Every structure is written in C-alpha cells, then in structure tokens.
Image (spheres, rainbow, N blue to C red):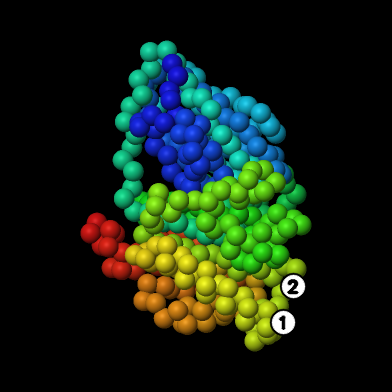
C-alpha cells in the first residue's frame, strides 16, 4: 500500500523544499515527518545527496530511537517497522546538517494498513539560527563530555540531542532548526563550505544553501512564523582570525557588530511579532564575542530582543556539546523563555 507523500495525514515540520509536494526535499537538521498507522510494515525510500561525512537519518519508532545509514548516493530503503499488526507512531527525522540532503520518494505500508490522523501539532513555534552546536553535531559522543571531539565521520551527530530540539520539546513547540556546522556570520569566515566559506548572512533566508550539493533556493517566510527566534551565532567567527579577542574596538570587530546588527534587524522585519533571543553556547570562545552581542542588543533598544547567557557560557567545553550537556543548556534556555511568555501572545493565551 503506497501513501502519497503529500497526504494530509502526514505531518511535516521544518524548512522543507516542497516545490514537488510528492517528493519533499530535506536540508536542515531536525526536519521531521510524523505519521500513525495500523498495520505491520512501514518502509520509506529516500534519495541521498552526500556532500561530506557519512550520512545517517533517525526515527522514533513506537517510542524507541533508531538510526539508519544511507548510501552515499542514490536510493536507500528504510524499514521502520516490520512485525506485529498494531497501531504504530513514527517520527522520521534528519539527524545532520547540509553535509547531505535527502529527497523523500516513496512511503509504503503493508497491504490492509490504515493511515491514521497524526498527533496534534504544537501551537508554539520556535526557530533557531546556529552552528554545529545548534545542529547537534557529535552530540552522541557522551564519553567525551567536556573534552575535545573523538575522531568521527558523522556517526555521532544527532539533532535529536541538540539543545535546540531539546528546548523545543521542553516547551512543547515546533522547531525550524536553521543550523549548519562551521558557519559564522560573515562570508569568508568560519569553516562552512571551504574554500568559499559561506556565512549565515548568505544562508539564513535559503532552503538549499550548500552549493556543493544543490543550487541555492530562497525560502518563503510566509510558510512559518515563529513566536521565538533564537540566534546562536558568534563562535566560528573567530576563524581564520580571532579579531574580537585581539581588539574589541578594532575595525574588524566594529564591522562584525555592524553586520550582526543589520542581520538582527532583518530578522525583526521578517518576524515583527517574535521575541528574539541573542546568545552563543557553552562551547569555548572568547568573552568579547558575547560582549559584542550585548552591545548590539543595547543599541537595538528593542523590548522584544534579549541577550541570554548560559551559566557556563563560552567556557563549558572545548569540544562539541554532548547530549547530556545540551540537556543542561536546554533546561536553562527553556526556563528563560518561560519567563518571557508574557511577551509571547500565543503562549500567554495558553
């Protein structure tokens, strides 16, 4: 029994390319598809477009998390469940950033199955702009909490354990996780897309944005209006030169703050009713980056723009944030957002 991938009983979440609604294309971490059915078997065929690392996707199948490796290119058949005839709930999601993209091609259920209505979608909506930490990169390497990363090839990266998605779950909110490993604010800095080094300025309004895989395409912001926007940029910006650490009053530092301010104003103009939270993470970085964000926040003088610091901000770990560390971050961030709920109309009503 084949199910059209634009069936209304399939619940999608994330910034998705839906130009072909029967073959949606996924780019960003934490992009998901949730569906319920009564039957024995559920299989999904996807086409993988790999840029780097090995490619893995994930699923929560009847409450149990599973990981599925994908072929470097071409089609992979993912078998979510094949056994007892009963009601099943499946949440299929993208574990990784644009190191690969996937096209959903075919969903097949066992003959005689019945596709059911999906769970109720949260009313609350958040959006996160961030780097590898927001994407959950290397988050499963729990043995390396507070340490440098182990050698890896993508197998430890899991957006489910990112502070971003954990925060959304704590708040019962839908999430769009616009996060990319290695990205900084400005083009020509950071680590993403070597040797071009694209920055968030060039990526934040896109669906496809990795030119090594696909042609860049614009996002239609009318499709999703978040109540809360979390901006976690200002860590990879110290590469190839940590000019903020060297001289916070220098020309390059001033230029960064000018561009950062302009970008936040663009987000504000796009989401006029949203609360915007400026932050970084507990990944080790110089405090001058956070000081610069604080200055911009004050200059904006906007009663719906806030600067948030974690208790271990900038000094929590030299490596990526593991799932347990992300849990601590999410607890702090969710509590902070809860305190702002009076400024969020939809949340205030709840």
Name the image quarter holding residue 349.
Answer: bottom left
Disc 1: CA contacts within 10 A as few (<14), some (14-19) or many (>=20): few
Element type where label 2 sits in the image = loop
Residue sitting at x 68%, y 39% = 50
- Return the residue at label 1: 246
Query: Is residue 297 shown above or below 327?
Result: below
For numbered disc 1, what is the local secondary structure?
helix
In percent of width and height, residue 144 lies at 67, 54
Distance (Cα) linking label 2 and label 1: 9 Å
Q: Residue furthest top?
A: 111
Which residue in the protein does label 2 denote?
241
The reply to whether dot 2 and dot 1 touch (C-beta < 8 Å) is yes
Using the rendered image of the protein, determine whether residue 324 is visible from the camera's viewpoint: no
Q: Nearer the viewer, residue 163 or 253?
A: 253
Q: Residue 340's x, y, as percent?
A: 34, 68
Is the residue 273 above or below the residue 322 in the image?
below
């Amino acid at each position: 029994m084949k199910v059209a991938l634009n069936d209304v009983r399939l619940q999608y979440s994330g910034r998705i390319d839906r130009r072909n609604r029967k073959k949606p294309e996924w780019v960003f971490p934490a992009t998901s598809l949730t569906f319920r059915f009564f039957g024995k078997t559920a299989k999904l065929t996807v086409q993988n477009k790999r840029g780097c690392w090995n490619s893995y996707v994930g699923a929560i199948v009847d409450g149990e998390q599973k990981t599925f490796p994908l072929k470097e290119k071409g089609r992979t058949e993912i078998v979510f469940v094949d056994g007892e005839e009963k009601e099943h709930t499946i949440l299929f999601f993208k574990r990784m950033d644009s190191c690969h993209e996937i096209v959903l091609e075919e969903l097949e259920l066992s003959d005689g199955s019945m596709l059911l209505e999906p769970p109720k979608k949260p009313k609350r909506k958040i959006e996160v702009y961030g780097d590898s930490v927001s994407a959950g990169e290397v988050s499963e390497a729990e043995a390396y909490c507070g340490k440098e990363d182990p050698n890896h090839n993508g197998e430890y990266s899991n957006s489910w354990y990112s502070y971003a998605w954990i925060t959304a779950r704590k708040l019962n909110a839908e999430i769009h996780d616009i996060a990319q490993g290695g990205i900084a604010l400005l083009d020509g800095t950071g680590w993403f897309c070597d040797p071009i080094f694209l920055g968030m300025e060039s990526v934040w309004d896109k669906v496809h944005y990795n030119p090594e895989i696909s042609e860049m395409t614009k996002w239609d912001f009318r499709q999703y209006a978040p109540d809360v926007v979390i901006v976690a940029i200002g860590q990879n910006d110290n590469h190839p030169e940590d000019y903020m650490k060297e001289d916070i009053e220098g020309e390059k530092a001033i230029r960064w703050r000018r561009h950062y301010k302009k970008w936040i104003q663009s987000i504000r103009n796009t989401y006029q009713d949203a609360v915007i939270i400026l932050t970084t993470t507990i990944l080790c970085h110089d405090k001058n980056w956070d000081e610069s964000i604080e200055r911009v926040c004050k200059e904006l003088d906007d009663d719906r723009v806030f600067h948030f610091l974690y208790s271990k901000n900038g000094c929590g770990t030299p490596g990526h944030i593991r799932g347990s560390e992300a849990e601590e971050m999410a607890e702090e961030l969710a509590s902070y957002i809860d305190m702002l709920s009076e400024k969020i109309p939809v949340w205030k009503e709840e």
